[in-house]
Image: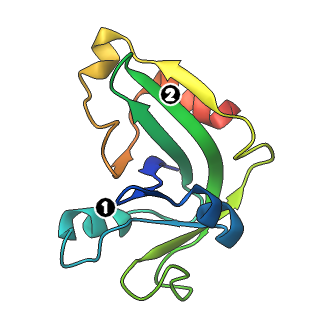
Amino acid sequence: MKVWGIGANWGGKSMLSEFEKKKAVGIGWDEASAPALYAMMNEIDIGDIVYVKSYMLKGRRLRIKAVGEVISTAFEKPNVFGNDHRTVCVKWRDGSFLNIQEHELTKEEHRYNVYSHTLYREYNHTIIKKVLEY
């Protein structure tokens, strides 16, 4: 099982409510514009955990907004955000979207400077623990 962080801001528009309603996540770029992100999306497997996050540079705060388990990948179900956006379907945990948790990154954690990225695999054991306990 891998843990993935994903943002919900698509060009200034929050997709948080769409992620909740459609029980899915995706990235706001088409594959031609962001091939590396799509290569990463291809590594997400059924049973992996995704968390919807935002990152506030000032104060180095990571917000965990929702957590769910991947139940279907883009290759098994039509894309719910349109053909230009690959979809990962998620079973959201109870309390997702209602209970936002914040984590202030230490200087050491901040060195893994991915928290403002669209999508990344989470390796920080402290954050993984928070996500799994969400």
User: Vertically, is 1 above or below 111?
Assistant: below
User: Element at badge 2?
Assistant: helix
Query: How many labels were placed on the picture?
Result: 2
Mark 1–mark 2 Cα distance, whole angstroms, equals 20 Å
State the residue position of label 2.
Answer: 127
Query: Which residue of the protein is positioned furthest toward the top in this rendering?
Result: 107
Name the residue at 30% across, 45% down: 117
Is 98 positioned to the left or the right of 127 in the image? right
Other residues around mark 1 within 10 Å, as few (<14) / some (14–19) / many (≥20)? few
Name the residue at 58% across, 56% down: 16
User: Vertically, is 126 above or below 115?
Assistant: above
Q: Position of residue 17 (x, y in %)?
A: 64, 60
Q: Position of residue 131 (x, y in %)?
A: 60, 35
Is 18 positioned to the left or the right of 28 in the image? right
Name the residue at 81% across, 47% down: 94
| Amino acid type of the residue tagged 2 in the rendering | Ile
| Residue 40 - label | 1
Task: For the residues labelled 1 and 2, say whether their Cβ atoms are less than 8 Å apart.
Answer: no
Asked where in the image residue 77 lies, by quadrant, the reply is bottom right
User: Vertically, is 101 above or below 107?
Assistant: below
User: Which one is earlier in the sequence, the residue at label 1 or at label 2?
Assistant: 1
